[in-house]
């Protein structure tokens, strides 16, 4: 990872706060959270259940808005964008892997992987569908599912379903990958395989990864650790302690028009 003086973060959060109304009171979930994520960097987001990890991932993934603070994606402030533009930014730049696989049961593995591309391309999909299918087949081969592309989720094991979910997350070559307990529903052996695969492919694509987990063994695979305690970021280790492997400069993928 490059020193912060030479490389701007691909994802940055500044003073994020988030609360939810509970009857007549408000539950404060996040308090003044700040973080920076760089290309090719893997950061573990640790914390107990209820500490705010999933809420923070939803904010970073542009699925929700903070009460206060700002999120920057490739240097662009996201709060000034409307819902449609934020959705375009999310589809083009952010991949998600969840503990639950969230595959569409009526679609094959190949069709599940293609779904985010169809949503991102819109009507342009029809002109590029053959190229998009080639890309989806390529990423499914990369996750070891060349022989299972036409299988539906119920015909796949848990590990195979998560491999499809990883392929779906990476098919758009996102700048950022948000993974919420991606091995939580897998046995230890399969989970270790899936984690190694996920992080290897992310490194190859120079994708910045936020890996939410409560498992210290999973977090041990990361470059840096962040810890949430009662919605507050306890600490973020300095970049100097994490900068071990330089990464090449990559042109930013961000592309979206501002709504008027």
Image (cartoon, rainbow, N blue to C red):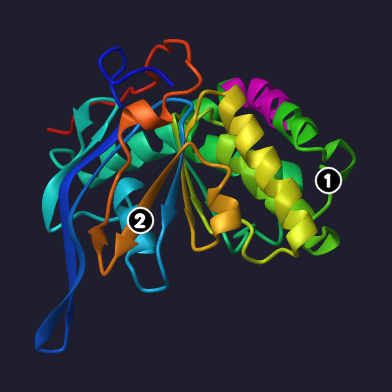
Percent across and percent down for residue 84 are 28, 42
Sequence-first disc among 1 and 2? 1
List the residue tagged with mark 2: 227
Task: Please tell me whether mark 1 or mark 2 is closer to you in this view.
Answer: 2
Question: Residue 66 appears in which quarter of the rendering?
Answer: bottom left
Q: Name the side, left or right, on which 106 lies relative to 59.
A: right
List the residue tagged with mark 1: 150
Residue that appears at 75% across and 47% down: 193
What span is colored magenta in the figure?
A: 128-136
Residue that appears at 74% across and 61% down: 188
Quarter of the rendering occupied by the C terminus: top left
Determine whether the residue tagged by mark 2 lies in a helix, strand or loop: strand
User: Foreground: 211 or 85?
Assistant: 211
User: Foreground: 205 or 78?
Assistant: 205
**Secondary structure mostly seen in the magenta stretch:** helix
Are there few (<14), some (14-19), or many (20+) residues within 10 Å of tag 1?
some
Q: Is residue 71 above or below residue 92?
A: below
- Give the tally of numbered discs: 2
**Is residue 246 one of those drawn in magenta?**
no
Percent across and percent down for residue 97 are 55, 50
**Is residue 129 one of those drawn in magenta?**
yes
Q: Name the side, left or right, on which 165 lies relative to 160.
A: left
Q: Name the side, left or right, on which 113 lies relative to 55.
A: right
């Amino acid at each position: 990872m490059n020193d912060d003086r030479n490389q701007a973060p691909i994802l940055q959060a500044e003073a994020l706060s988030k609360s939810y109304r509970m009857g007549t009171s408000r539950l404060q979930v996040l308090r003044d959270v700040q973080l920076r994520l760089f290309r090719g960097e893997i950061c573990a987001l640790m914390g107990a259940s209820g500490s705010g990890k999933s809420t923070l991932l939803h904010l970073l993934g542009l699925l929700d808005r903070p009460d206060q603070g700002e999120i920057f994606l490739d240097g662009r402030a996201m709060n000034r964008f409307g819902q449609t533009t934020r959705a375009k930014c999310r589809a083009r730049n952010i991949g998600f892997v969840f503990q639950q696989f969230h595959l569409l049961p009526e679609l094959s593995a190949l069709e599940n992987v293609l779904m985010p591309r169809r949503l991102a391309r819109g009507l342009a999909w029809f002109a590029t569908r053959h190229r998009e299918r080639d890309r989806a087949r390529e990423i499914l081969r990369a996750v070891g599912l060349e022989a299972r592309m036409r299988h539906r989720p119920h015909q796949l094991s848990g590990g195979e379903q998560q491999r499809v979910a990883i392929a779906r997350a990476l098919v758009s070559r996102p700048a950022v990958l948000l993974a919420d307990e991606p091995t939580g529903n897998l046995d230890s052996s399969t989970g270790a395989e899936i984690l190694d695969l996920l992080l290897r492919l992310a490194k190859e694509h120079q994708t910045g990864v936020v890996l939410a987990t409560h498992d210290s063994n999973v977090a041990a695979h990361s470059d840096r650790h962040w810890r949430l305690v009662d919605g507050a970021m306890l600490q973020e280790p300095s970049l100097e302690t994490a900068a071990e492997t330089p990464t090449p400069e990559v042109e930013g993928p961000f592309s979206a028009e501002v709504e008027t």
